[in-house]
Amino acid sequence: MTRFGTCMTGIVLASALVAGSAQAAPSGLKRDAVAGVEKRAKLAQEINDSVFSFAELGFQEVETSRYITDLLEKEGFTVERGTSGMPTGWVARWTNGSGGPVIALGSDIDGIPKASQKPGVPYHAPMVEGAPGHGEGHNSGQAVNIVAALAVKELMQRDNIAGTLVLWPGVAEELVAGKAYFVRDGVFKDVDAVLFTHVGDNLATSWGRPSGTGLVSVEYRFNGESAHSAGAPWRGKSALDAVELMNVGWNMRREHLRTEQRSHYVITDGGDQPNVVPSTAAVWYYFREQDFKRIANSYAIGNRIADAAAMMTDTTVTRRILGTAAPRHFNRPIAEAAYENIKAVGLPRWSEDEQAFARIVQKNVGSEKQDGLATKLDALKAPVEEPKSGGSDDIGDVSWVVPAITVSYPANIPHLPGHNWSNAIAMATPIAHKGVVAGAKVIAMTTLDLLTRPKLVDAARDYFVNVQTKDEKYVPMIGSGDKPATELNAGIMARFKPELSKYYYDPSRYSTYLEQLGIAFPMLEEKPAAAAQ
């Protein structure tokens, strides 16, 4: 096995596949797919580390998208760029033969604000102070999908397997602002199944509706009239007063909303300076709920409160949807097929160095559990009777127009806070490299299942039509005239990109990003005093 390999040997894989042969693609194909992923482990590491080094925020994933699309074109994919009016949006397609299923592989590509972090350093050590970074691990998913797709593509050509592979990015997922536009504009209209990948700390998938929420993200902009704040305040109409009144009104209304709702806001424009009555002000809200009807209800309440705040201040208000995410619902037959492959692949065999490093990271960030990396597979996750509230993901929009699942792969450390610099620590280390390869094997094997088992595709469609969408249909929150908010994060990236670019990974000179940065793995230092403060 290579240093990127998993605990699975060829013999174990063969026996697992033979045992499940009544439900799986031909075992020989799957062995060859696994071998195809393993021989591309170096490519997976290079993609993972390169995207990590770009550290780009949503809608500004310029270097990331250029790098990935150039790579895919060299591998024979036809690439459409600028999809749905997003400069960093793209769709890559490759077809073999005529007919056959269309399988789409997607993963997010954007980073997190203020999450800059040197990989492999187990305490807070920004690459560039205040800059963005991959504090969610979105640098890794395209590596999973590309390596899996290339392994499957080789087998499709060799064995004359008909079908189409489609690769696509989750643009600005942290703003939940990209996928609904792909859906609206028909990116998935001819797709039979979507396999979405997301970084995690185990190898897992689920079906049905998981815990979490959908949402609508909307900015309210108030317009008033400026005046001298001391000399003639009575002549002003304060847009900032309207923002503050809206926030007070919403916070009062919270008491009378379901406990499952989640809502939050930031003031994006609070005026210019204190001695001028603010003529403009804006506030950005996320309204989260667990189904389409309740999301729409929260949004309607927000609109009424905004209108009321405008009336109280004699200002005017406009609103703009900046993003949206449907509640997720994942396909049972595809999830069950993927889980059989998860069991065949198994978790990576972690070295003691990797476990020690994970434990010291957990200790340094104050995690309650400091038990290192996962060594036992999660069970296949079925729907719970009463899903809990929580976060959102715009893969939900995709899941309501085509049978879809999400596969998480163990490229990160358990028990970290999420959306935080600490979640970037492992993401360009051997931990991420092994986790990406494990995920790619599962995706390659499941893609083969969908390409070679017509009954699986039929079962997935039957579940989608007769279970998932039987009593509830997709309700899009954006209309034909809405446009992606592609200006978001432009100023932040313009400020930090010149310094970040000094740290872009050069795989032609260095075998890993850690080598380029001069970081020896594993660093096992406890949090230094400066970091503790």
Image: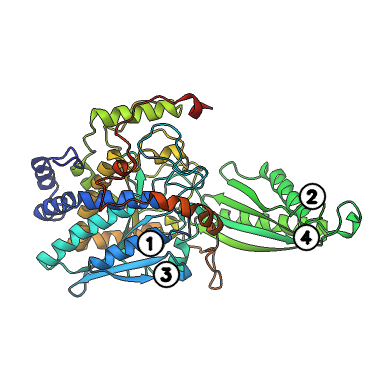
Circles 4 and 1 in contact, beta carbons < 8 Å? no
Residue 71: x and y, percent? 28, 63
Residue that carries the numbered disc 2 in the rendered image: 274
Vertical order, 197 against 280 (above or below)? above
Q: Of the residues under marks 1 and 3, which one precedes in the sequence?
A: 1
Nearest-to-viewer mark from 1 and 3: 1
Residue that carries the numbered disc 1 in the rendered image: 65
Q: Quadrant of the N terminus?
A: top left
Judged from the image, the secondary structure of the residue bearing numbered disc 4 is loop
Going by the image, does 60 lie left or right of 453? right
Q: Residue at x 24, y 33 (%)?
A: 350
For label 3, the crowd category at 10 Å Cα-Cα, with few meaning under 14, some 14 to 19 and many 20 or more, is some
Q: Of the residues under marks 2 and 1, which one precedes in the sequence?
A: 1
Measure the C-alpha gap from mark 1 to mark 3: 12 Å
Mark 3: which amino acid?
Thr
Question: How many circles with numbers are drawn on the protein?
Answer: 4
Is residue 194 visible in the rendered image? The answer is yes
Residue that carries the numbered disc 3 in the rendered image: 83
